[in-house]
Image (cartoon, grey):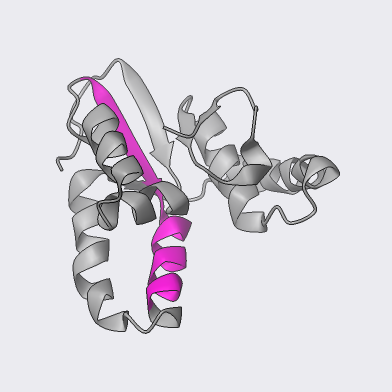
Amino acid sequence: MRRGSGLTARAVVFDTWAWWEVLHATPTGKRLAGRYLDAPGVRVLTVDLALVELSAKLAREGRAGEIGTALPAIEAASEVVPISMAAAEASGPLLADLRKTRRDASLADAVMLAVARCEGADLVSGDACFAGMKGVTAG
């Protein structure tokens, strides 16, 4: 995995789902790494909230010892971006819209999508609440 650099042709935001797949080298994760992380001209972004979600998920699964290697690996392979004021403002209405079709859509889902839109990027996610949504790809 490598961090995108300088001017690039395309930006994507990896959400927690995407990073989970990559970190665990699932077939989907390997495909995502090849398509985005290892591809020239792709700027991969990670919302800082995704790091928190991954830390929590690893801890819940009894794998807290992996947090100290997983998060730095993500930081090295992507550009970690904070939640901007614009993304924060967009997240509430996006959550309401997402929940019109999927009651289980989370605030984190809305934040990931808001950041992607604010950054002019596509969101890479396999979360069901994004099924068929423009600007979102499952990889």
How many circles with numbers are drawn on the protein?
Answer: 0
| Residue at 22% over, 20% down | 41
Q: Nearer the viewer, residue 78 or 88?
A: 78
Of residues 17 and 94, which is closer to you in this image? 17
Q: Residue furthest top?
A: 9
Task: Classify residue 97 by image quadrant.
Answer: top right
Q: Position of residue 11 (x, y in %)?
A: 37, 26
Compared across the picture, whether 14 is left or right of 27 comes to right
Q: Position of residue 79 (x, y in %)?
A: 29, 43
**Part of the protein shown in magenta:** 41-58
Q: Nearer the viewer, residue 111 or 127?
A: 127
Residue at the image point whose x is 39% and y is 80% from the top:
59
Q: Going 80% across and 53% down the picture, which residue do you hit?
A: 103
Residue 19 image position (x, y, % from top left):
35, 51
Position of 5 compared to 90: left or right?
A: left
- Residue 4 sits above or below residue 58 on the image: above
Main secondary structure along the magenta-highlighted residues: helix
